[in-house]
Image: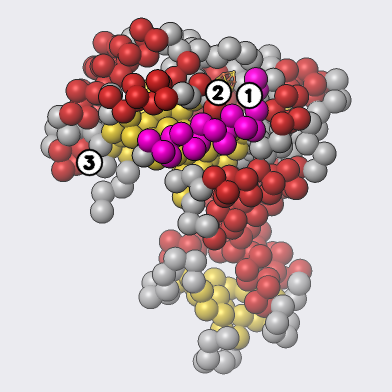
Amino acid sequence: MEKHKNLSIFVPHEGCPNQCSFCDQKKISGTQNPPSPDYVTQLCDEFLPHDSAQGASYEIAFFGGSFTAIDRGYMLALLQAAYPFVKRGRAAGIRVSTRPDAISREILDIMKEYGVTAIELGAQSMQDHVLKMNLRGHTVQDVFTASRLIKEYGFSLGLQMMPGLYGQDDYMQCAIDTAQQFIRIKPDTVRIYPTLTLKDTLLESLYQKGMYTPLTVRQAVEICAVLVKMFNRENIKIIKLGLHADTGLEHSLVAGPYHPAMKELVYSHIMMESFTADLQQLPAGDYTVYVNSRKHSQATGQKKSNLLALQQLGYNVTIKDDNSLTGDNYTIIKEGEKQCI
Ligand code: SF4
């Protein structure tokens, strides 16, 4: 099956009624200028395949701001520029991201008319006091109401969350609580963005005054590992974990759990937890753990961190490949024995 691809078009800071504590969207998107409809047409024409069989695996994605809250004429012009490519089969649909309080039946009617197939809501937290302290300007109820409407209309629903926001007494517990409420909503997809502190944001000034302590990379990995397991159990697809370096944020990053391979760290941590739980049923000693070759680096951990941690526990582990194993499955064999454990 063809891998799903997004043609991402950033619409920076358009339509935001406020300035959320963590956000400097212009820096994240790496552009100051909102895209013109002509630019959208040009980009779609250059990037999207001409063959509809290939086009079926592409989506045109308007990200970055609050798409459904931008100037109505401008929003329609962007959709009118993108929609012909969906009609011609060069893309399967249009994906937009927006604020939970910028959804109504009228908006959703427009989205349907112009080939939008997926709507992502920046929920960020499911605690009202956290939303308030981070100047989100919407409530938890807005997330529930907007999600219900989006699902009723038959769009694919995505929810985004940000562990480590200002105002959370217990980062882990707050993240679990938000994930539990997401699970009640049953979105099709989620994105997990551990909170980063960027230049010229409220978070930066709170951090400089010692009033906000960002997550460390280690804490973010541990929290995300719990979230990944929760969403996986419910078959909710995680489409993004952590921000990419190509967004230009490295220049504006002041503090917080940024790591270019956050996803890899999280999945590696999950494997480590699983190996530890199994090995601790066994006597200390030398073991070989077989994994699918695609999981080899996750199993080993960055700079062999998993192997070193297991060594501390008395387990001298070698990772070897066995491509008859699928997914996250693995087998453990004690050195000198032939049988799987
Ligand atoms: S609504 Fe979104 S784009 Fe606007 S300020 Fe908040 S986080 Fe940034």
In the image, is residue 241 part of the stretch drawn in magenta? no
Q: Which of pointers 2 and 3 lies earlier in the amino acid sequence?
A: 3
Q: Distance between the residues labelled 2 and 1?
A: 6 Å
Q: Name the mark nearer the viewer: 2 or 3.
A: 2
- Residue 254 is marked as none
Q: Is mark 2 on a helix, strand or loop?
A: helix
* Residue bearing mark 3: 56
What SS does tag 3 mark?
loop
Which of these two is toward me, 300 or 85?
Answer: 85
Splitting the image into 4 quarters, where does residue 55 fall? top left
| Residue corresponding to mark 2 | 101
Lower position in the chain sequence, tag 2 or tag 1: 2
Residue at x 51% of width, y 48% of height: 186
Residue occupying the point 19% across, 41% down: 54
The Cα atoms of the two marked residues, 1 and 3, are separated by: 35 Å
**Looking at numbered disc 2 in the image, what kind of residue is underneath it?**
Asp
Mainly helix, strand or loop, the magenta region? helix
Q: Which amino acid does label 3 sit on?
A: Ala
Identify which amino acid the numbered label 1 is placed on. Answer: His
Confirm whether residue 282 shows in the render.
yes
Is residue 324 left or right of 281 when viewed as pictured?
A: left
**Callout 2 environment at 10 Å: few (<14), some (14 to 19), or many (20+)?**
many
Residue 328 at what x, y percent from top left? 49, 66
Can you give x and y, in whole percent of width and height, for residue 153 in the image? 38, 35
Residue 299 falls left or right of residue 149: right
Q: Where is residue 161 in the image (x, y as percent from the top left)?
A: 60, 37
The magenta region covers 136-153
Disc 1: which residue: 138
Whether the residues at callouts 2 and 3 have beta carbons within 8 Å, the answer is: no
Mark toward the start of the polypeptide (1 vs 3):
3
